Image (spheres, rainbow, N blue to C red):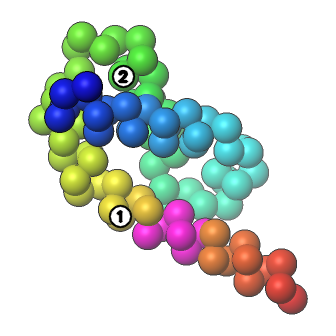
Amino acid sequence: MTCSAAPCFKLTIIGEATAQLSAALRRQHTALPWADIVAFRNIAVHAYFSIDWTIVWHTAAQDVPTLRTQVQRILDGMDAGSNQ
């Protein structure tokens, strides 16, 4: 795997995991770009040779850390709700 392919593979995994989330959870947290995440996964898997690698790198370096923080907040909220 090249330096470009590795982040793309990780983004594909994030997209696949996002596609498996319930519609109810996605509706509860509309601030996150769920459809865009899944759409990226679909492009990466089905149109690999047309990927813009600059976008992949920007997404991995800039957007994923923000997404991780947002997802962690959701998980923390779920944990807090189960402890009541």
Q: Is residue 29 left or right of residue 64?
A: right
Q: Hey, which quadrant is residue 49 in on the image?
A: top left
Q: Hey, which quadrant is residue 67 in on the image?
A: bottom left
Q: Looking at the image, tell me whether mark 2 or mark 1 is earlier in sequence order.
A: 2
Q: Report which residue position mark 2 lands on.
A: 44
Eyeballing the image, is 2 above or below 68?
Answer: above
The answer for how far apart the CA atoms under marks 2 and 1 are is 21 Å
Label 2 element class: helix
Q: Report which residue position mark 1 lands on.
A: 66
Q: Which residues are magenta?
A: 69-74
Q: Residue at x 22, y 53 (%)?
A: 61
Q: Amino acid at mark 1?
A: Thr
Label 1 element class: helix
Magenta stretch contains residue 71: yes
- The residue sitting at the left extreme is 54
Q: Does residue 55 appear anywhere in the picture?
A: no
Tell me the quarter of the image containing the C terminus.
bottom right
Q: Residue at x 67, y 38 (%)?
A: 20
Q: Amino acid at mark 2?
A: Ala
Magenta stretch contains residue 75: no
The mark found on residue 13 in the picture is none
